[in-house]
C-alpha cells in the first residue's frame, strides 16, 4: 500500500529558514513524495530530493517563485496503484483557482473518465480536499507555514487498488 507525502510552498529561504522536522520525517517515511512547486531555491529542491530518497521518488513541478535555474516541468503526472495524480502549481489569482487546476489536470490526460483522476496543486497555502466537476482536488497548504499560511501543513495519501485515503498533517 503506497504511502505518498504531498507538500508544496516550502519557500525556503525567502519566507522560512527550513523545513520542519515533522515534515522531514513524513517525507522520509513515504514511498514517494509530491511537491507542487515554490521550493524557492535550488537548495530546497535538492533537500526535498534527498529526503524523498532520490529523484525517482519525487514528482515535482515548478512554482511561480522558483528560480529559472530550477528546471522542473509546469505539470507532471504520476500513476500509483490505479490512481492518476496530475501535479501543477496552480499559479494565478485565487479567483478561479479550482477551475484552473481541474482544467490543467484534464488537459494532461487523454482519459474518457475522471474516475481516479486527482489534481494536486499549491500556490494558495490553504489546505484543500474537494471535488470539482468529478475531479478530486488537493492542496497540501504550505509545508513550512510560509505566509499567508498560519501553520505548516501537508497531506499524506495512501493508495490501494485504485482507492485513495488522504489525511491532513499539521504541526
Image (spheres, rainbow, N blue to C red):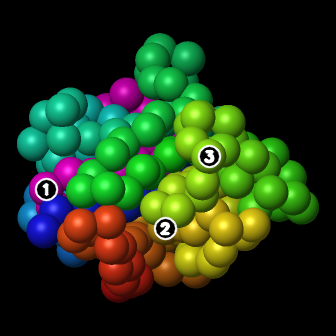
The quadrant holding residue 65 is top right
Q: Mark 3 points at which residue?
A: 112
Q: Which of marks 3 and 2 is in front?
A: 3
Q: Label 1 crowding class (10 Å Cα cut-off): few <14, some 14-19, many 20+?
A: some
| Residue found at the far right of this picture | 95
| Mark 2: secondary structure | strand
Q: Mark 1 points at which residue?
A: 31
N-terminal of the pair, mark 1 or mark 3, is: 1
Q: Name the residue under label 2.
A: 140
* Residue 32, percent from left and from top: 21, 51
| Mark 1: secondary structure | loop
User: Magenta segment range?
Assistant: 30-44
111 above or below 120? Answer: above
- Residue 95's disc is none
40 or 169, which is in the foreground?
A: 169
Q: Which of marks 1 and 3 is in front?
A: 3
Left or right, residue 47 beside residue 59: left
Q: Would you say residue 18 sits in the magenta stretch?
A: no
Q: Do the residues labelled 1 and 2 touch (CB within 8 Å)?
A: no
171 or 165, which is in the foreground?
A: 165
Residue displayed at 33% across by 45% down: 79
Q: Label 3 crowding class (10 Å Cα cut-off): few <14, some 14-19, many 20+?
A: few
N-terminal of the pair, mark 3 or mark 2, is: 3
Amino acid at each position: 500500500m503506497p504511502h505518498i507525502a504531498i507538500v508544496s510552498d516550502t519557500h525556503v529561504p525567502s519566507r522560512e529558514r527550513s523545513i520542519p522536522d515533522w515534515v522531514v520525517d513524513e517525507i522520509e517515511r513515504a514511498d514517494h513524495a509530491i511537491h507542487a512547486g515554490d521550493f524557492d531555491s535550488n537548495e530546497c529542491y535538492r533537500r526535498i530530493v534527498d529526503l524523498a530518497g532520490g529523484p525517482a521518488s519525487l514528482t515535482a513541478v515548478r512554482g511561480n517563485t522558483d528560480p529559472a535555474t530550477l528546471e522542473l516541468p509546469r505539470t507532471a503526472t504520476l500513476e500509483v496503484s490505479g490512481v492518476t495524480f496530475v501535479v501543477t502549481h496552480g499559479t494565478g489569482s485565487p479567483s478561479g483557482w479550482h477551475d484552473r487546476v481541474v482544467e490543467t489536470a484534464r488537459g494532461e490526460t487523454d482519459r474518457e473518465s475522471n474516475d481516479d483522476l486527482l489534481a494536486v496543486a499549491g500556490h494558495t497555502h490553504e489546505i484543500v480536499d474537494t471535488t470539482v466537476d468529478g475531479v478530486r482536488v488537493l492542496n497540501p497548504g504550505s509545508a513550512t507555514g510560509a505566509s499567508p499560511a498560519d501553520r505548516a501543513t501537508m497531506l499524506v495519501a495512501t493508495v490501494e487498488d485504485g482507492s485513495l485515503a488522504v489525511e491532513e498533517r499539521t504541526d
